Amino acid sequence: MVIIHMMPDDTVQMAVASPLTAIASDGWIRDGKGHPRSAGTYTRVRGGYVREKKAISLMEALRKMTLMPAQRLESLTPTMKNKGRVRVDADADLAIFDPARVADMATYAEPTKQPESLLWKAVGCK
């Protein structure tokens, strides 16, 4: 596995703020090793780019992390019409967090370290 640091933060911030950008991670963990973005992408956006840098609003960030990726995949995978939405009969993975405290805690040494301020998580709700 190779991890390369190539994108300057201002480039990432510009991409995060773009109305065309959906937010997701292609990171993976194998045998406890991997890129910290595998566990920290979403908290980094909410803590870093929403709260600290004010590059986008919290609601826009949540849309970019949930609805946008689902909408981009709907034509290929019709079940995506039930993802990224909170409504009756939708597939919902819900996380309750404190936006004032949310922080990415994953590191290269501990890439699966859980984020700060996750208060409750329910996966696969129907």
Image (cartoon, rainbow, N blue to C red):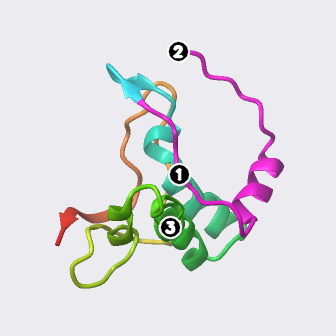
Frontmost of labels 3 and 1 is 3
In the image, the segment drawn in magenta is 1-28
Which amino acid type is shown beneath numbered disc 1? Ala
Marks 2 and 1 sit apart, C-alpha to C-alpha, by 20 Å
- Rendered position, 3 above or below 112: above
**Place of residue 1 in the rendered image (x, y in percent of width and height, measured from the top left):** 53, 15
**Place of residue 107 in the rendered image (x, y in percent of width and height, measured from the top left):** 50, 33
> Circles 3 and 2: CB distance less than 8 Å?
no
Label 1: how many residues lie within 10 Å, few (<14), some (14-19) or many (20+)? some
Q: Quadrant of residue 113?
A: top left
For residue 64, side relative to residue 11 (left or right): left
Marks 3 and 2 sit apart, C-alpha to C-alpha, by 31 Å
* Sequence-wise first label, 3 or 2: 2
Which residue in the structure is indicated by mark 2? Answer: 1
* Sequence-wise first label, 3 or 1: 1
**Place of residue 34 in the rendered image (x, y in percent of width and height, measured from the top left):** 46, 25
For numbered disc 3, what is the local secondary structure? Answer: helix
Magenta region includes residue 2: yes
Q: Mark number for residue 71? A: 3
* Sequence-wise first label, 2 or 1: 2
Which amino acid type is shown beneath numbered disc 2? Met
Furthest residue in direction left, as rendered: 126
Which amino acid type is shown beneath numbered disc 3? Gln
For numbered disc 1, what is the local secondary structure? Answer: loop
Residue beneath the point at 39% across and 28% down: 29
For numbered disc 2, what is the local secondary structure? Answer: loop
Q: State the residue in front, 90 or 96.
A: 90
